[in-house]
Amino acid sequence: MNPNPKCLCFTHNAFIGANIGTELSDMPHPTQVVALLKAQQIRHVRLYDADRGMLVALANTGIKVAVSVPNEQLLGIGQSNSTAANWVSRNIVAHYPATNITTICVGSEVLTTLPNAAPVLVNALKFIHSALVASNLDHQIKVSTPLSSSLILDSFPPSQAFFNRSWNPVLVPMLNFLQSTGSSLMLNIYPYYDYMQSNGVIPLDYALFKPLPPNKEAVDSNTLVHYSNVFDAMVDAAYFAMAFLNFTNIPVMVTESGWPSKGDSNEPDATLENANTYNSNLIRHVLNQTGTPKHPGIGVSTYIYELYNEDNKPGPLSEKNWGLFDANGDPVYILHLTGSGSVLANDTTNQTYCTARDGADPKMLQAALDWACGPGKVDCSGLLQGQPCYEPDNVIAHATYAFDTYYHQMRKDPAACNFNGVAVITTSDPSHGSCIFPGSLGKNGTMANITAPSLNSTISDSSAYKIYGSSSLRSILTVIRLLVWGVVFL
């Protein structure tokens, strides 16, 4: 328990993790899931159950695991100390410490999705914790329950926020439990839904973490504190809501947050670009240990919702498209984490390339290619007919070769990979066949040669460059596997 009840005094760094849902028609085997986690250097995961196959596969990886008591098991555990003890014995003790279980999430959004279990929720928390105490694991493994942010009323301005008072008989003893055990308040925060339900009151840029000028920021009229994004405002609303009940030293952990990459016709802002923008900005924000206006410098550990797109999820199209990866482990989009180049530059392998941006205007690509091969002083002889990089003879492939050569000539300065917005930094080696790009490790290197399918398409008219549709992003840029995510998930 925090010896100073008036302040948050935490020294650990906030982390980014990933939720692993399983409602996929082709759910990867646990060993494949863990292979993806290891390849991406994802260090924190949350499971929605305590699946034995996953817990066995995660053993000896060092990955920190949050396991869950599913809602359907909550009534039994909340009514029986022995049932809770058996659950802990079977799902925790049997796997720890080989599997690095750090957290138990007891249910999920119980008060809003399973209100009939609310009366036993605090008992369930206590019974699970007692079983950990009996096994001498209560200091290593924390116990909490993820709540919906909809429990917080009047969330803006944050200083006026309070929990739905009808749930105080549950929330007060729950917060007492969290405080006495040094656990976090777990909150699911979805700025996407806040934005969608605001009828235009919440600007899209404010929901997406986009930088705002001070005059566009939201101001708490009571504290005069400025808020530049929905996420921080909701976290601070939770802090104020707890303070309203006289709890001031419980940290907030965000157990779910993300943005869908695709939606139905009535969900126009569920797009690849918006999902990319939100998650990229969220990841940077958390890992920068920025904290919130109320608690600057106290980072908020957050699990991204979610690892995989779940095609079996019911509901609107957006429900199936929150994932960072598809079932094959291919990224749904390439995260924008290279802003200043610092993320990639910090990686030990530092293997980066500059490629043509998918969907770029063909005339702008051609102009940038002409500049690179002219004033940019790139040796473009490799693009001449009969030379290794002539095929495929299209503007995407040729521009990528010229852009990457210039980028490496400029010592991989991120500013050298822009070309008026038609270029992008990637970790996927664009080399193909006998066309080896600058910086490529080649066939004998530790990084595989990657053939980009759209670059190998046949173009019948070499004088008329063909530009592929926006879906070719995943063909051209393939997988950010090790570099960016290796830095992200620490």
Image (cartoon, helix red, strand yellow):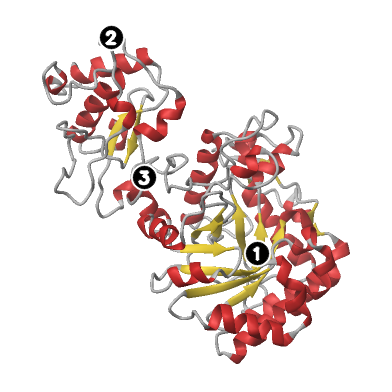
Q: Which circle's residue, 1 or 2, is located before the other in the chain?
A: 1
Q: Secondary structure at mark 1?
A: strand
Residue at 42% across, 23% down: 359
Quadrant position of residue 129: bottom right
Q: Residues within 10 Å of mark 3 (few under 14, many from 20)?
A: some
Q: Residues within 10 Å of mark 1 (few under 14, many from 20)?
A: many
Would you name the residue on which mark 1 appears? 186
Q: Which circle's residue, 1 or 3, is located before the other in the chain?
A: 1
Measure the alpha-carbon separation of dots 2 and 3. Answer: 32 Å
When the figure is inspected, residue 459 is found, relative to residue 316, above or below; the finding is above
When the figure is inspected, residue 354 is found, relative to residue 191, above or below; the finding is above
Q: Amino acid at mark 2?
A: Asp
Measure the alpha-carbon separation of dots 1 and 2. Answer: 58 Å
Q: Secondary structure at mark 2?
A: loop
Q: Residues within 10 Å of mark 2 (few under 14, many from 20)?
A: few
Q: In the shown orientation, is residue 362 left or right of residue 303?
A: left
Q: Amino acid at mark 1?
A: Met
Would you name the residue on which mark 3 appears? 480
Q: Quadrant of the C terminus?
A: bottom left
Q: Which percent across, then down, holds residue 111?
A: 79, 63
Q: Quadrant of the N terminus?
A: bottom right
| Front-lying residue, 478 or 227 | 478
Q: Which mark is residue 461?
A: 2
Q: Which circle's residue, 2 or 3, is located before the other in the chain?
A: 2
Q: In the shown orientation, is residue 254 left or right of residue 108?
A: left
Q: Which percent across, then down, holds residue 385?
A: 14, 16
Measure the alpha-carbon separation of dots 1 and 3. Answer: 30 Å
- Look at the image and tell me whether residue 161 can be seen: no
Q: Secondary structure at mark 3?
A: loop
Between disc 1 and disc 3, the foreground one is 3
Residue at 79% across, 65% down: 244
